[in-house]
Amino acid sequence: MPGFSDRDRGRDRGYGAAPRFGGGGGGSRGGPPQGKFGNPGERLRKKHWNMDELPKFEKNFYQEHPDVTRRPPQEVENYLRSKDVTVKGRDCPKPMMKFHEANFPNYVMDVIAKQGWAEPTPIQAQGWPLALSGKDMVGIAQTGSGKTLAYLLPAIVHIQHQPFLEHGDGPICLVLAPTRELAQQVQQVAAEYGRASRLKSVCVYGGAPKGPQIRDLERGVEICIATPGRLIDFLEAGKTNLRRCTYLVLDEADRMLDMGFEPQIRKIVDQIRPDRQTLMWSATWPKEVRQLAEDFLKQYVQINVGALQLSANHNILQIVDVCNDGEKDDKLLRLLEEIMSEKENKTIIFTETKRRCDELTRRMRRDGWPAMGIHGDKSQQERDWVLNEFKYGKAPILIATDVASRGLDVEDVKFVINYDYPNSSEDYIHRIGRTARSQKTGTAYTFFTPNNMKQASDLIAVLREANQAINPKLLQMAEARGGNSYGGSWRGGKRWL
Ligand code: AMP
């Protein structure tokens, strides 16, 4: 099948670089880091493209597998309906329900086979044929939905069909991500699959020494995963360029906008040829994200998985404890004693502030709990270390601010405790979504105090949607505030948070 076979890879190609510690890129809310000298990207000029002069490149590699062609329309429709997939836009290819239908190269299929997965996730099933056909696309999906592979595997196919990198060439595939954590996660996946296909990748993010990242870039990488601030630095300093970039991914676009990265994103996108393929991913679909899609994408197809309303993963048991602030410590203690007697006990405790996170960590460690804290003021090195200790089970309790509420993908988190209720039900859904990853189950405990009263009706709506039992005290609070039209004030979003 054209386009999907291994091409001759006679040259010596290194493997994907392992992610290094470092910070920047804006791990927590509070906006992107400012450049040391004025406005970041000030020295980058908008490029004026003469399309006749640009070298031609291919981006449509899709050939429908005969099994997909043969599949009756009714079966396709049933599949899409049962997986809650909706498609907007013209000429979207049919979904592929089985891995072999994607016709990925053998070395990619071998890595997939090792994972033991039953079938593509819905976003992969519909995203792969779309991305492989070279079209611009928007995917409303999150971490947990399988979106990373939904864009990375077609990226590998895209790259394999481009000429080899020459000395001084920048990446062919650029993935922009809001936080270093997400960028590193994506790079781990890129390294795993890239290793098999002999493609190199680098993760570029601020706060870490520039030297190793520059060295990787200069050695030549096909895939660059970057937070916007550091990439702008490198582009301005001429350490890399986007002349070869023909496959652009904007991951968690809504979050990048929330964090104030829009000017940087625009500067970066201005450096990339307009006939590139652009894939934009977002958990929500507010007007700012729609505007970005209008500006950066051409005749795009949009895929939504799940309802266009923010809702919690239904595999999570949600328990809300209505209490007073003074009772929280005691309740936490009792809860943890119970949880720690379980075999699987990995737990994230969310606090509202960094100070509270530090205090709670100190107290818990003093009392002998295997707990560690993470928040945006910690050095990146420390954050990476803490996350690893948590990931590999050495410290099964992670105390965190919202720096860990989105994107963090540690597979076996069984419990989330909201020691403090977050600012919005959107954040609540993201936080509890750290458990019950990849079809597993999990439990979320939430301490809800009279101070959180104005959030009661939104929370009730989330619980209702997920068919959870609702604490009568919570209902009373909502009623006391005169709210019986529960929630509905969120921006558009989707399941599987
Ligand atoms: P992501 O949405 O890319 O962050 O992926 C979430 C998790 O789903 C990761 O741990 C992946 O390894 C896993 N995953 C990706 N594709 C599949 C699949 N087809 N079936 C089951 N799990 C998957």
Image: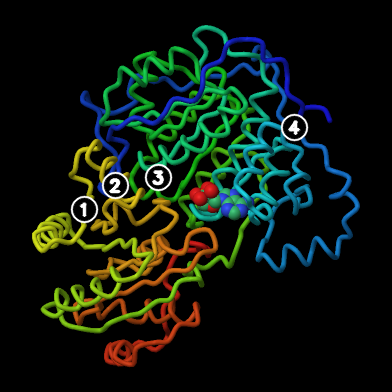
Q: For marks 4 and 1, give the one nearer the viewer.
A: 1
Provide the secondary structure element on which disc 2 rests: helix
Calculate the distance from the C-alpha at mark 3 to the C-alpha at mark 4: 28 Å
Mark 3 is on which residue type? Answer: Met
**Residue at image location 43% in from the left, 51% down from the top:** 409
Provide the secondary structure element on which disc 4 rests: loop
Residue 480: quarter of image: bottom left
Residue 453 or 62: which is nearer the viewer? Answer: 62
Provide the secondary structure element on which disc 1 rests: strand
User: Which quadrant is home to the N terminus?
Assistant: top right
Q: Earlier in the sequence, mark 2 or mark 4?
A: 4
Above-or-below relation of 191 to 119: above
Q: For marks 2 and 4, give the one nearer the viewer.
A: 2
Calculate the distance from the C-alpha at mark 3 to the C-alpha at mark 2: 27 Å
Q: Give the residue at mark 4.
A: 60
Q: Earlier in the sequence, mark 1 or mark 2?
A: 1
Q: Earlier in the sequence, mark 3 or mark 1?
A: 3
Q: Is residue 13 left or right of residue 97?
A: left
Residue 316: assigned label: none
Residue 256: assigned label: 3
Residue 408 or 38: which is nearer the viewer? Answer: 408
Q: Is mark 3 within 8 Å of ligand 1?
A: no
Residue 32 or 44: which is nearer the viewer? Answer: 32
Above-or-below relation of 254 to 220: below
Mark 1 is on which residue type? Answer: Met
Q: Give the residue at mark 1.
A: 372
Mark 4 is on which residue type? Answer: Asn
Mark 2 is on which residue type? Answer: Glu
Q: Earlier in the sequence, mark 3 or mark 2?
A: 3
Provide the secondary structure element on which disc 3 rests: helix
Instruction: Measuring from the top left, give residue 224's x and y in whole percent.
Output: 48, 27
